[in-house]
Amino acid sequence: MTQLVWNGLFVGSFYALVALGYSMVYGIIKLLNFAHGDLYMLGAFTGFAVLGAAGGVPSSLSLPLLLGVLLATMAITGLAGVALERVAYRPLRRAPRLSLLITAVGASFALEYGMRAVAGADPRVYPVRLGGTPLEILGARLTPQQLVLIAVAVVFMIGLNLLVTRTREGRAMRAIALDPRTSALMGIDVNAVISRTFFLGSALAGAAGVMAGAYYGKIDFLMGFLIGLKAFTAAVIGGIGNIPGTMLGGLLLGLLESFGTFWLGGEWRDVFAFGVLILFLTVRPTGLLGERVTERV
Amino acid sequence: MLEIRGLDVHYGGVHALRGLSLTVAAGEVVALLGNNGAGKTTTLSAVSGLLRPSGGAILFEGADITRDPPHRITARGLVHVPEGRRVFSALTVQENLQLGGYLVRDQAEVRRRIERVYDLLPRLAERRRQRGGTLSGGEQQMLAIGRALVTGPRLLLLDEPSMGLAPLVVASVMELVAGINAEGTSVLLVEQNAVAALRVAHRGYVIENGTCVLGGPAAELREDSRVVEAYLGGA
């Protein structure tokens, strides 16, 4: 039982990290960035390349090394996200929403098959595995590395939430989400803030990619497709555009899958996830924490 | 201070401004009058960079700002309070005001400016934790103007601040405008409410079909038969 909860929280923290970028980008430019899952894939491959460049990996050092690789990868995927926005989405800022959506699907394919051209179609084995002696915590078995990864994910989430709610930059992001034209009149460089939002969201997806690579041990160029949809589901459950809601959605989805798999069998895992997506879209499309602001005119 | 020379704006297929020229001198309140669709809002949007003119020039304190993006124009001290107030509805009153201080690096200075706005507009101080969208129309207008004051403007562009407000509230908005001007900020005031606008303005222009057809001191415009007929409700 506790094992199921821990597994759920562990997978859920990946979902939450990826979902945050989805949610932030949707919040600020109302775009469902279908290429977001592929930035996670790009993160996994970037981490793979950085680890390869770092040479042999002594298993005793794997954790500090992994954290270093994590930061380097976040910088690179962050910049990739900025480039994606600049090249694919910014020229369409005033175009109909459907054009943007189709472009996002195109960007997703470009990243996937671009990676296949570079790295090949065969899955790669990650050079770092999260082994270690499992600890007994409340009757569940967890490796210290798993705990550290959950902790890292939680730190990122808390940091992001503080950034959005407490800082000048976060205020600018929320203002643009509500009204970009008026935000510009406040002296906010709207394009620059949108770029930085893509950087943050993409960096978090990249971090999740490295963590997933190290956890599952295998990566391939299509790995971002499913997690992109899962992250979308998590964002919808929590309330897309809402940061705490998205984190909650990610963790809930992880737990649902963990318990669903236990009760119904592994082959039902994705059915469970997308069943929940459809349920929310029909019954409560604003999500658990999403809300409509009543406005007086 | 502000000089608009032969401004042309097209949008969609519409030729919205046709060679419009006007000036605002330092320390002045200038009213821009005209009917719906005459080009008043278009003029302000072109000055603040929200719309890109197809011809003509806009000079602010001697610098050509015709093609500058909006955030650069705000940074120069030329600040536009748009039509319909455009308060950030899901953000608190305090956060709205803090956004006005976005370009001010010194946070202590931002706090001082916000406190000055609260002194000037005590109703906002009472509601500082409330979301902007929950304020009444008059309070939202005050917030929109207060937010612009936090940017530290030298010239304010006000677009229909009296729109949809009760006469008593209109009077207090106009009083606020006069007070702001008394402290040294110039104002370009767009209004359909010509009576209220000509009471606070030093000078005024009348625009029709995207060009200025009349201009002069406010006292003269109030007496001008054409203005009286068209905008002041007959003789």
Image (spheres, coloured by chain):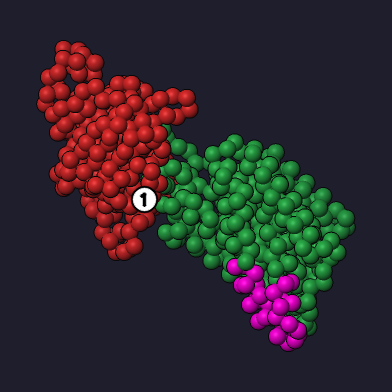
Which element type, helix, strand or loop, lies under badge 1?
helix
With B1 as the anchor, is A163 left or right in this view? Answer: right
Q: Residue at x 64, y 46 (%)?
A: A32
Q: Main secondary structure of the magenta part?
A: helix
What color is chain B drawn in? red
Residue B182, placed above or below residue A35: above
Quadrant in the picture for residue B189: top left
Residue B110 visible? The answer is yes
**Magenta region includes residue A54:** yes
Q: Amino acid at mark 1?
A: Arg
Quadrant in the picture for residue B27: top left
Q: Residue at x 62, y 72 (%)?
A: A72
Depth check: A56 or A180 in front?
A: A56
Where is residue A111 drawn, in percent x and y? 72, 55
Q: Residues within 10 Å of mark 1 (few under 14, many from 20)?
A: some
Residue A8 visible? The answer is no
With A135 as the anchor, is B29 left or right in this view? Answer: left
Where is residue B139 drawn, in percent x and y? 32, 39
Q: Residue at x 49, y 41 (%)?
A: A293
Give the quadrant of the C terminus of chain B.
top left
**Magenta region includes residue B126:** no
What letter labels the chain drawn in green? A
Residue B56, placed above or below residue A16: above
Quadrant in the picture for residue A149: bottom right
Q: Which residues are magenta?
A: A48-75
Provide the residue designation for mark 1. Answer: B72
Give the quadrant of the N terminus of chain B.
top left
Where is residue A147 drawn, in percent x and y? 69, 75
Depth check: A291 or B4 in front?
A: B4
